[in-house]
Image (tube, rainbow, N blue to C red):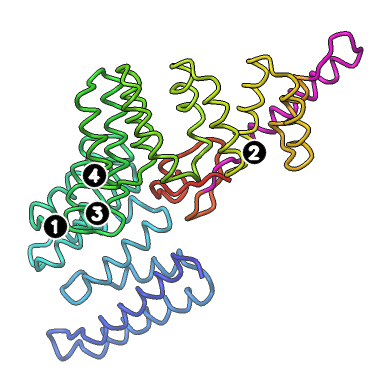
Amino acid sequence: MDLWLLLLVVVSIFIGWGLGRWRPLKKSDTTNQAENFADSYAQGLNYLLLDDPDNAIKVFTNIIEVNPNTIEVHLSLGNLFRSKGEVDRAIKVHQSLLARADLNRKQRNTAIEELANDYLKAGLLGRAEKLFKELIDLNSHNLIAHGHLLDLYITEKSWDEAVDSAQILFDNKHAGSSVALSQCLCEAAEKAIHKGNQKKAQKNLIKALEVDNSCVRATLLLIQWHFNRQESLAANKIFQCLITKRPEFMALYIEPAKKLFLKGNESTQYQAFLKQQYISWPSTSLAVALLEHYVKTNQSGKAIEFLTEVLAKTPSFGTYDFALQFLRDDTIPLTDMWEGLSKFLKAMQEKKAEFVCTQCGYGSHAIQWHCPSCRSWSSMKSI
């Protein structure tokens, strides 16, 4: 059953409940009004059974009078409009409720929250932010409002504000808040680095690791931060801890390893690192990195031997492309064909997902710390 149909069923139940509680003031009008309401209610249900939601909504909208007994019905009806994409109608319903003076505190807070969600759906982020802040002013422990604000700031890429909202959720031990806070701190750190504020960047990264000591992203950024400051020993110490603690992200560690080892002219150690990691965590990225190192250091024999082994055991687009480039001979008339095949393999490689979200299955060629599909933080793993 579609979400809007399920909500419509809930609305119909509320309407039935409201009608059961409705009592007109004048006895003489009781029978006629009750019958009119009952007939309209039955007509609305009939439209629902005939899979005609538009007419059903029209009937239900016409029969509902805004009074204390039907406020919940209006809230549900507004949500139904929003779920169907009729955001303007949802806004009107929820605004009409907020205009009433007889709402109790709980009803008013609910109406504010639903109107804020309407504004979010409509892309009116400024208005939504204002209402969520109003809810927090009324109750500073409203974690739902703080959560909505966090999502809004993430959408706007307002990372300092996102950090503040995530911190509140973290302080209240909200589920998943440690990952969200650490990732928002990483975003804020990257922004600070881009603006040249190295002190703020370091502070955010250290805080991110205090919140989530297994945060790969924060660790990689901190390694780069030390490396930029020519602090190779500190960077290497953090790097060694990282590859031991989170080896499943080894594909992301190749570039930092290259910088750290080759910076100190430790070509042999870099080669040993790649070989050891490939044995433990075989992947195309490690294989190609080692092959490229062999070629760059004039170890053609080792390159051919290792390439033959890799293509026999774990062939891939990346290793085949390397083979074509490495074995190409300009004196052979088939050079153009090999070049075209190489480009084709590269194009296929670019389309191939290398990371997948463990929460929703979304695939991406590059690591996405914030899944664009299910919006989970740090949920992607290397394939």
**First of labels 3, 1 by sequence position:** 1
Q: Tell me what residue is drawn at x 24 percent, y 51 percent.
A: 116
Query: What amino acid does circle 1 point to?
Result: Ala
Q: Which residues are magenta?
A: 327-356
* Residue picked out by circle 4: 210
Q: Tag 2's secondary structure?
A: loop
Foreground residue among 167 and 294: 294
Q: Which mark is residue 99?
A: 1
Distance, label 1 to label 2, CA atoms, is 53 Å
Distance, label 2 to label 4, CA atoms, is 35 Å
Q: Tag 3's secondary structure?
A: helix
Displayed quadrant of residue 66:
bottom left
Displayed quadrant of residue 282:
top right
Foreground residue among 247 and 200: 247
**How many other residues sit within 10 Å of disc 1, few (<14), some (14-19) or many (≥20)?**
few
Instruction: Measuring from the top left, give residue 99's x and y in whole percent.
Output: 13, 57
Nearer to us of marks 2 and 4 is 4
* Residue picked out by circle 3: 115
